[in-house]
Image: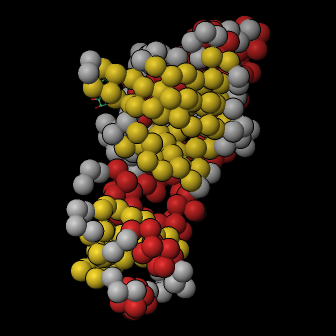
Amino acid sequence: MIEVSKLTKKYGDKAAIQDVSFNIAQGEVVGFLGPNGAGKTTTMRILTGYIPPTSGEVKIGGLDVFADSLVVRQKLGYLPENTPLYLDMDVEVFLKYIAALKKVTADKRQTHIRKIMKICGISNVSQSTIKTLSKGYRQRVGIAQALVGNPEYLILDEPTIGLDPKQIIEIRELIKSLAEDKTIILSTHILPEVSITCTRVIIISEGKIVAEDTPNNLENRLSGVAKVLLTVKGQPEKIKLSLQDITDVTEVNIKKTHPGGLIDLEVASQKEADVRKELAQTIVRNDWDLLEMRREVLGLEEIFLKLTTKE
Ligand SMILES: Nc1ncnc2c1ncn2[C@@H]1O[C@H](COP(=O)(O)OP(=O)(O)O)[C@@H](O)[C@H]1O
Ligand SMILES: [Mg+2]
């Protein structure tokens, strides 16, 4: 279990992340999705104990990442952004070195590393110097490095960034195969990534969490929904209640109340249903004034953009 509670990290006056809280249960594969600069790397660095938060706390397996940092690090595998590798080392030598750092006992290192290289599909380049490897292979070495010591938790910062489409598919397959016995959080700024690999998605934008759900639910919730935007004059709560009663209306939100009794409302409905007529009739029947009505249908991409960009 990873428990993140109220993390804030400030650089000077500017908060890179603010009040970030989430939990990840054992065995989950969670996608941490957000545009560049959203605060993904900052959050992951804090999760792995590399930088302290300004406030808030992180517990992994019940232990505080800072107070018990040595124990926690044994349980963690971390692929940092821009995978720092020792470019002049051979792959196997590099992994042995990491194994020594992670306190894998000398007699077990060879077997352990062979196994990891096999899982990551890098056995054939075990004797190659890292700097001679393609970006895709280097990424595999980065993931292999994170697997040394058989950690329960994997924290992968943009594992597929900079890879070509074929390499991306291969890395996704690799992550999926690892998911069988590990708890994984991976960050990405591209949407399709999460629906393919993850059981749950946390969307972060400008340092704040803006949505959290399964990819399926997100997709249904977001693409299966049509919205009607209304401006009505009348009593907000009464209007809300009446509109909620209409068949096929799933949600009514008051977006804004203006002076003079004007109210902006957002009415969500099943995508197939067009509730505009019923909305208009209900409003007229109640003697409220209908000043504006507009329908929009949202796709997953649009929703992601909506959630992650300022209006
Ligand atoms: N060491 C730092 N000093 C100052 N600002 C930083 C530092 N690291 C990150 N930031 C800022 O914090 C915000 C979040 O960055 P980051 O966590 O790298 O986002 P992401 O990984 O989602 O692209 C950005 O605005 C970035 O400029
Ligand atoms: Mg980043």
Indicate whether 45 appears above or below 188. above
Residue extending farthest right: 107
Q: Position of residue 188 (x, y in %)?
A: 43, 43
Q: Which residue is depicted at the point 43% across and 54% down?
A: 191
Residue closer to the observer: 214 or 119: 214
The answer to which quarter of the image holds residue 149 is: top right
The answer to which quarter of the image holds residue 304 is: bottom left
Q: Which residue is depicted at the point 32% across and 27% down?
A: 15
- Left or right: residue 225 versus residue 72 is left
Q: Position of residue 81 (x, y in %)?
A: 41, 29
Residue 22 seen: yes
- Indicate the quadrant containing the C terminus: top left, top right, bottom left or bottom right: bottom left
The answer to which quarter of the image holds residue 16 is: top left
Indicate whether 48 appears above or below 189. above
Residue closer to the observer: 263 or 307: 263
- Indicate the quadrant containing the N terminus: top left, top right, bottom left or bottom right: top right
Quadrant containing ligand 1: top left
- Left or right: residue 134 versus residue 25 is left
Q: Which residue is depicted at the point 35% across and 86% down?
A: 287
- Left or right: residue 178 versus residue 303 is right
Residue 142 seen: no
Q: Which residue is depicted at the point 22% across and 62% down?
A: 259
Q: Position of residue 68 (x, y in %)?
A: 64, 10
Q: Position of residue 293 (x, y in %)?
A: 29, 81
